[in-house]
Amino acid sequence: MARGRSDGEETKRRITAAARQLFTRKGYGAVSMNEVCVEAEVSKGSLYHHFTSKDELFLKVIEEDSEQWSREWEKIRERTSSTEDQLYALAEHYANDFQNPLLAAQEEYSRSRPITGDVLDRLLRISDNNSQACRSVLGDGMEKGDFAGGELDRLVILVSSMLEGLGKIYYMLDRDKEQHKIREYYRDAVKLLLEGIRAKRN
């Protein structure tokens, strides 16, 4: 029995790994479940046993990607001391994820249909991972007196939206020639932000 569960988990991991490769290369719409079967080397019955639809499979892939992003951030944060340095490090973590093709696939997915119910809840939980990273840094900064007091929830929305919104640089730069500018824009944004939220010292 234990062996059956282990084999099932291995098959599921193989499916999600194959799907991730395909969604990364082709986006959401261009990938078929048949292609996933071929890439993962599983039968259609096995695929649908683990994932009832392409939607379900795609959501699993981007959930895993979001969880990986959060785990990587926690490792970075452990190596970073001051809250201001953490805010710069967080901006750089966003910048490093700048060209993650799964972000474009997720945007394509969200635009392709009305999003309601359980799917909306799952997408909101994925988005909340990034918000939680902002919340922990900003909350600590307020507690330590590094950042001015205020409404934390409101500040989290503003800062996470700013960092996510900088993704528009993707459409404004020559990515082959100006890749080095991406981190500069993120650092400049944090510098501007800190002018507003840094606690005033007497």
Image (spheres, rainbow, N blue to C red):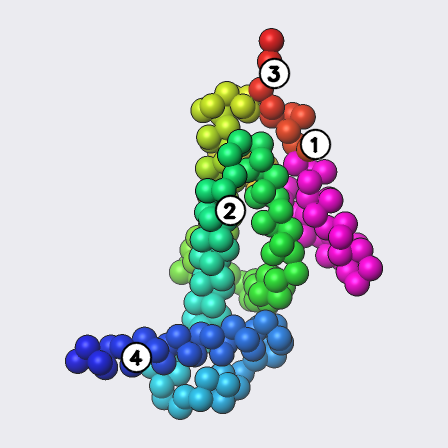
How crowded is the residue under tag 3: few (<14 C-alpha within 10 Å), some, or many (20+)? few
Kindly indicate whether the residue at mark 3 contacts the one at mark 4 (C-beta within 8 angstroms). Answer: no
Q: Earlier in the sequence, mark 2 or mark 4?
A: 4
Give the quadrant of residue 193. top right
Question: What secondary structure is found at the residue carrying circle 2?
Answer: helix
Q: Residue at x 43, y 67 (%)?
A: 60
**Type of amino acid under label 1:** Leu
Q: Earlier in the sequence, mark 3 or mark 1?
A: 1
For the record, the magenta segment spans 161-190
**Type of amino acid under label 3:** Lys
Give coordinates of residue 20: x percent, y percent: 52, 73
Quarter of the C terminus within the rendering: top right
Classify 83 as above or below 113.
Answer: above
Q: Earlier in the sequence, mark 3 or mark 2?
A: 2
Q: Residue at x 45, y 24 (%)?
A: 143
Give the quadrant of residue 198. top right
Q: Earlier in the sequence, mark 2 or mark 1?
A: 2
Majority secondary structure of magenta residues: helix
The residue at which mark 1 appears reads as 192
Kindly indicate whether the residue at mark 1 contacts the one at mark 3 (C-beta within 8 angstroms). Answer: no
Give coordinates of residue 103: x percent, y percent: 59, 61
